[in-house]
Amino acid sequence: MVQIIIKYVERLIESRKVLILRKRFRPDEDPKVNVTLDSAVKDVLVAVSGYKPAIHVGSKLNDTIIVEHIADTEKAKIIAWNNTEPGDYHIEIKTGSGTINTLLTIYGTSKITFSYGFSVLKPKYMNETTNRPVAGK
């Protein structure tokens, strides 16, 4: 069990993850969501807690998305899908109990990189900067 959780944590911290959606479903709610991914999202990690959860991911054309199973326990399931295409996706959750809440959390890996630099003069290119502030300026 500990190894499964560690694998999930490793996936979360290995790259830039952004929270796309977090939603708690009451037992009387239908646990389905639609998510739109843009071109900045590379990979997606979906975590569900509930009793014997199952996750189905489909495209807007109802094609089943192939996912990687990261963790699967009696009370949690974690999946990932890589190299996502921009567009609309449908995520449906099923659980083995109608008496407890279900929590869905979706993270995405951003393809956007952020570069910064410091310079006394306004640079035209990043290679005209340093990665530390200029002393005394």
Image (tube, rainbow, N blue to C red):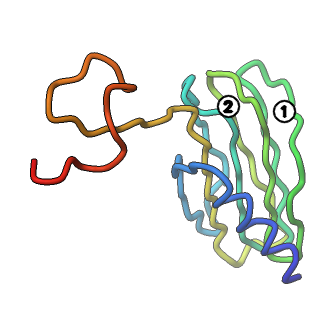
Q: Residue furthest left?
A: 137
Q: Nearer the viewer, residue 77 or 122?
A: 122
Residue 129 image position (x, y, % from top left)? 31, 33
Residue 2 image position (x, y, % from top left)? 84, 83
The residue lying at 58 percent from left, 30 percent from top is: 37
Q: Is residue 28 above or below residue 34?
A: below
Q: Quadrant of residue 67?
A: top right
The reply to whether the C-beta atoms of the residues labelled 1 and 2 are less than 8 Å apart is yes
Residue 109 circle label: none
Residue 4 image position (x, y, % from top left)? 86, 73
The residue lying at 76 percent from left, 18 percent from top is: 61
Residue 104 image position (x, y, % from top left)? 64, 59
* Tally of numbered discs: 2
The residue lying at 54 percent from left, 28 percent from top is: 40
Residue 89 circle label: 2
Q: Amino acid at mark 2?
A: Tyr
Q: Is residue 21 above or below residue 23?
A: above
> What SS does tag 1 mark?
loop
Q: Amino acid at mark 1?
A: Ile
In the displayed structure image, the side of residue 52 where residue 100 appears, left or right: left
Q: Residue furthest front?
A: 135
In the displayed structure image, the side of residue 126 where residue 104 appears, left or right: right
Q: Quadrant of residue 23?
A: bottom right
Q: Crowdedness of circle 1 by 10 Å Cα count: few (<14), some, many (20+)?
A: some
Pointer 1: what residue?
Answer: 65
Q: Quadrant of residue 9?
A: bottom right
